[in-house]
């Protein structure tokens, strides 16, 4: 085997390795994009609605008013 053949084989091997690595990264990016899309959907399901937040805030403010009345505050 001459020197050029060895160089061609090495370059081909390195090139194949790089292509395999880039393909693996590309597939991982696709998986990550899908995971992020799924996460956005799941997060949107778990947000408290404005009505729920208002009801909770009203309960807190009522409790504070009761404490003020009980302690004779303003």
Image (spheres, rainbow, N blue to C red):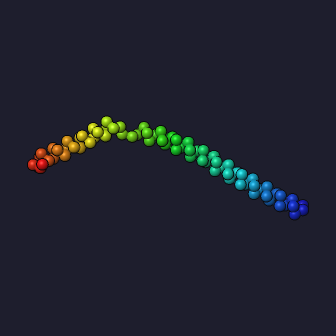
Q: Please give the name of the residue rendered at 35% of the width and 37% of the height, measured from the top-left corner.
A: 49
Please tell me whether residue 54 is drawn above or below residue 15 in the rendered image: above
Task: Tell me where residue 23 appears, x and y as whole percent.
Answer: 68, 49
Quarter holding the N terminus is: bottom right
Side of 21 where 53 appears, left or right: left
Task: Tell me where residue 74 appears, x and y as whole percent.
Answer: 12, 48
Q: Please give the name of the residue rendered at 75% of the width and 57% of the height, measured from the top-left corner.
A: 14
Q: Please give the name of the residue rendered at 71% of the width and 54% of the height, measured from the top-left corner.
A: 18
Query: Which quadrant of the figure has residue 31?
Result: top right
Q: Which residue is at the far top?
A: 51
Q: Please give the name of the residue rendered at 42% of the width and 37% of the height, measured from the top-left corner.
A: 45
Side of 45 where 70 appears, left or right: left
Task: Tell me where residue 38 appears, x and y as whole percent.
Answer: 51, 40
Q: Which residue is at the far front?
A: 74
Q: How many marks?
A: 0
Please tell me whether residue 19 is drawn above or below residue 46 in the rendered image: below
Q: Which residue is at the far right?
A: 2
Q: Which residue is at the far left?
A: 72
Task: Tell me where residue 30 appears, x and y as whole percent.
Answer: 60, 44
Between residue 20 and residue 57, name the one nearer to us: 57
Please tell me whether residue 13 is drawn above or below residue 62 in the rendered image: below
Query: Which quadrant of the figure has residue 15?
Result: bottom right
């Amino acid at each position: 085997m001459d020197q050029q053949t060895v160089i061609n084989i090495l370059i081909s091997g390195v090139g194949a390795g790089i292509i395999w690595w880039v393909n693996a990264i590309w597939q991982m990016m696709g998986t990550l994009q899908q995971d992020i899309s799924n996460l956005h959907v799941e997060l949107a399901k778990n947000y408290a609605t404005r009505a729920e937040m208002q009801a909770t805030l009203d309960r807190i403010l009522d409790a504070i008013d009761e404490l003020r009345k009980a302690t004779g505050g303003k």
